[in-house]
Image (spheres, rainbow, N blue to C red):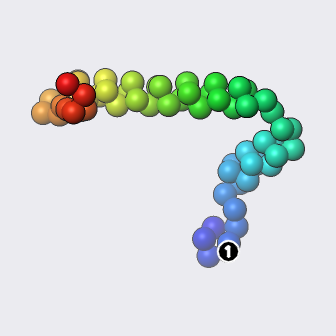
């Protein structure tokens, strides 16, 4: 895709959908906050489960 200078299809479709429908900002904020919380919770859980890893160590 880089050689052909073609956009990534899912990314282009997402941008087009947002541009054409003009949703409410709360509609966009809810999935972003949910996904961010899940990613952070997964990272903290894995950091506590995996041996020899203390992630995040600086929150103490």
Nearer to the camera, 5 or 32:
32
Secondary structure beneath disc 1? loop
Q: Is residue 26 above or below residue 4?
A: above
Q: How many marks?
A: 1
Q: Residues within 10 Å of mark 1 (few under 14, many from 20)?
A: few
Query: Residue sitting at 62 percent across and 76 percent down?
Result: 3
In the displayed structure image, the side of residue 50 where residue 11 appears, left or right: right
- Rendered location of residue 46, percent (x, y): 29, 28
In the rendered image, which quarter is residue 25 located in? Answer: top right
Residue that numbered label 1 is attached to = 4
Image quarter (top left, top right, bottom left or bottom right) of the N terminus:
bottom right
Relative placement, left or right, of 5 versus 22 is left
Residue placed at 50% from the left, 31% from the top? 36
Q: Position of residue 2 (x, y in %)?
A: 60, 71
Seen at 69% across and 31% down, the residue is: 28
Determine the residue located farthest toward the right in the rendered image. 20
Query: Looking at the figure, which quarter contains the C terminus?
Result: top left
The answer to which of 32 and 13 lies nearer the viewer is 32
Q: Position of residue 4 (x, y in %)?
A: 67, 74
Left or right: residue 25 compared with residue 19: left
Residue 14 image point, x, y percent? 73, 45
**Which of the 4 image quarters holds residue 31?**
top right
Residue in view at x 56 percent, y 27 percent? 33
């Amino acid at each position: 895709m880089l050689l052909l200078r073609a956009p990534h299809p899912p990314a282009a479709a997402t941008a087009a959908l947002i541009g054409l429908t003009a949703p409410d900002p709360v509609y966009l904020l809810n999935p972003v906050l949910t996904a961010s919380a899940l990613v952070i919770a997964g990272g903290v859980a894995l950091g506590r489960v995996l041996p020899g890893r203390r992630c995040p160590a600086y929150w103490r």
